[in-house]
Amino acid sequence: MRPSGLAVVTLSAVLIGVSLWPVNDVQVFSAQRQESGPYTLALPHGVLEPIIPEDNPLTEGKVALGRTLYFDKRLSLDDTVSCATCHNPKFGFADGKKVAEGIQQKKGVRNSPTTLNTAFLDAQFWDGRAPTLEEQAKGPLVNPVEMGMPSHDALVTKLRTIPTYRRGFQEVFGTAELTIDQLAKAIAAFERTLNTFNSPFDRFIAGDKTALSPSAQRGWELFQGKARCITCHEFNASYPFFTDNKFHNIGVAMKDVNFEALARKAAIETDVAGLAHESGAAELGRYLVTKQPRDIGAFKTPGLRNIALTAPYMHDGSEASLKSMIEFYDKGGVPNPNLDGGIRPLGLSEQEREDLIELLKALTSDDLPSLVKELERRGDR
Ligand code: HEC
Ligand code: HEC
């Protein structure tokens, strides 16, 4: 690498010489582009690259801009809520709450999932209604109980008055516009860097048989066998995220809701995001997107990395702990006409339930503390 480093030094010396001549805008812009070169994701050997939209390549500059936006409360109506309020590095990039709390302590109806490793998901949200991180990022900004901006236009107008953003967007996107699509692209680019591996479980899979306690090792056997977890929380070396990216009804939503009436109403409603935030209708899950009766009460299989950090669990935050999670599965979920065939009583002993919990605890990345520290060091709010 040394020789090419020297070459760069020589080249920039030449450029300094050249810059004595008048420079036009195009030259200045391309120099900035060089400063903010491509951002390379550091993935463990064998893990497949996440799909990155062609019109939103990762660059250092864009990731940095997205990071600033992610932590900036000025993206909300009253400057009190940022993406990080609900996807907080200190809570495993979730919020530790049953359901999300946005501006003026307004409560939503669903639990905040982690933003870690979301680059690898086929679809975003519990019902998968957003196909990309770009699309997803536009939702909370204008959700009345999340960040509460009256419109994307209002947000863009607000950000254009902030000189550092005017400059930052210009540098990254090369135009003076500052649009909502650019904002979504920058945030999505930052999120794509929030990937964590290096858990005790990963080291065990890589061959270090001492990385897991005997109890967690028994838990892994149960996970793949008697407890049947792996049928939905899929795991393999190229896609090690513990999800099949599919939607299942495991009974969580089956409370005192009149599903028939709700489904009839939702069948003709096109505002999916609106319904997803409406108490009652939100429980229809994947049905809101597909309008297929078999999807009533089905939700996306969540990944399980860092799961010990993000209680409470489930789309509605109804399970307080890993212990209650395992009890939920042990008794066979909540019976209902749409219950997924993979869910049935498991007959686990107390020791077996304990072993599964030990496994889930071993999915926490050892790299997280340094990631959190790094974000703090940069002074993100
Ligand atoms: C008030 C809390 C709140 C705020 C603020 C918020 N989110 Fe979320 N986020 C949620 C909730 C709740 C969900 C799940 C909603 C659903 O499924 O309908 C979610 C879902 C997501 C997902 C999907 C993850 C998955 O596994 O499907 C991503 C990614 C995400 N948010 C990123 C962001 C970004 C980026 C911002 C800022 C622009 C943001 N969120 C602001 C609460 C919040
Ligand atoms: C039939 C598919 C299926 C099987 C089998 C299954 N899960 Fe799940 N799991 C899901 C779905 C779907 C959700 C989300 C449900 C909801 O919120 O309505 C979920 C949620 C979870 C969550 C909460 C995640 C979060 O972020 O809130 C944990 C933990 C979990 N499962 C662990 C397990 C374990 C351990 C097993 C085996 C005992 C298991 N699952 C078996 C599909 C499955």
Image (cartoon, grey):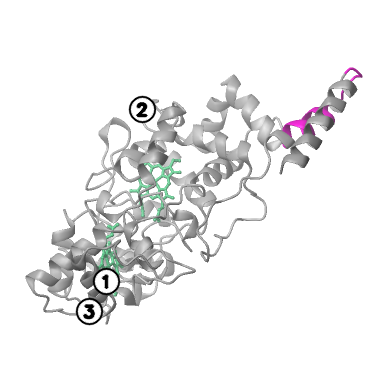
Q: Give the Cα distance between marks 2 and 3.
A: 43 Å
- Left or right, residue 266 beside residue 160: left
Instruction: Determine the secondary structure under disc 2.
Output: loop
Tell which of 30 and 260 is nearer to you.
30
Is the C-beta of the residue carrying label 1 under 8 Å from the nearest atom of ligand 2? no
**Residue at the spot of label 3:** 337
**Residue at the spot of label 1:** 220
Q: Position of residue 293 (x, y in %)?
A: 34, 75
Which label's residue is closer to the chain start, 2 or 3? 2
From the image, state whether disc 2 or disc 3 is nearer to you: 2
* Residue 21 within the magenta-colored segment of the rendering: yes
Question: Where, quadrant-wise, is the C terminus in this rendering?
Answer: top left
Residue appearing at x 37%, y 32% in the figure: 81
The tag on residue 80 is 2
Count of labels in the image: 3
- Tell me: residue 154, above or below residue 194: above
Magenta region, residue range: 20-33
Of all residues, the one furthest to the left in this rendering is 350
Question: Where, quadrant-wise, is the N terminus in this rendering?
Answer: top right
Which label's residue is closer to the chain start, 3 or 1? 1
Residue appearing at x 38%, y 25% in the figure: 78
